């Protein structure tokens, strides 16, 4: 993430009311450490018939990755994760074809 996105994460955490203190030590100082991803396993949508219906009936799952933002308590190091898509709507410089303009 570039500085613009880091600022966007901090802005959106405040705007969404994610301001509670650390659940472990009650400190209110946090740092945005960076980003990572988690693997999410899910069933295909419940669809009657067809390939998706067959996969659903067999219990076949698909895996996808979800980008996350990693935030740490500055005092005790407690780590929390937020879905990046909920906090970042801009793209890194030069990749802004699908995202909002940084001038909005
Ligand atoms: Zn803490």
Image (spheres, grey):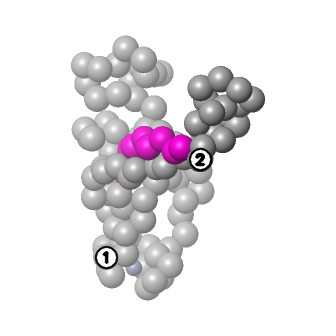
The spot of residue 9 in percent (x, y) is 41, 46
Q: Quadrant of ligand 1?
A: bottom left
x and y percentages locating residue 13 in the rendered image: 50, 52
**Residue, disc 1:** 77
Q: Nearer the viewer, residue 64 or 31?
A: 64
Q: Is mark 1 within 8 Å of ligand 1?
A: yes
Q: Bounds of the magenta span?
A: 60-69
Q: Which percent across, then down, holds residue 87?
A: 47, 43
- Residue at position x 59%, y 26% in the image: 51
Question: Residue 57's mark?
Answer: none
Asked which quadrant contains residue 43, the reply is top right
Image quadrant holding the N terminus, namely top left
- Image side of residue 70 versus residue 22, left or right: left
Which residue lies under the disc numbered 2? 59
Residue closest to the far top: 97
Left or right? Give the position of 38 relative to 42. Answer: left
User: In x, y percent, where is residue 59?
Assistant: 59, 47
Q: Mark 1: few, some, or many residues within 10 Å (few <14, many ≥20)?
A: some
**How far is mark 1 from mark 2, CA to CA?**
38 Å
Residue 95 among magenta residues = no
Q: Residue at x 55, y 59 (%)?
A: 18
Farthest residue, direction right: 48
Q: Is residue 103 visible?
A: no
Residue that protrudes farthest toward the bottom in the picture: 25
| Residue 6 can be seen, yes or no | yes
């Amino acid at each position: 993430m570039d500085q613009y996105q880091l600022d966007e994460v901090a802005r959106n955490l405040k705007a969404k009311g994610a301001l509670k203190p650390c659940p472990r030590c009650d400190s209110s100082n946090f740092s945005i450490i960076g980003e990572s991803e988690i693997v999410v396993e899910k069933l295909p949508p419940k669809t009657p018939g067809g390939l998706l219906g067959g996969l659903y009936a067999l219990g076949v799952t698909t895996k996808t990755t979800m980008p996350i933002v990693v935030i740490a308590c500055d005092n005790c190091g407690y780590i929390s994760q937020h879905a990046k898509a909920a906090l970042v709507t801009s793209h890194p410089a030069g990749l802004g074809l699908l995202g909002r303009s940084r001038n909005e």
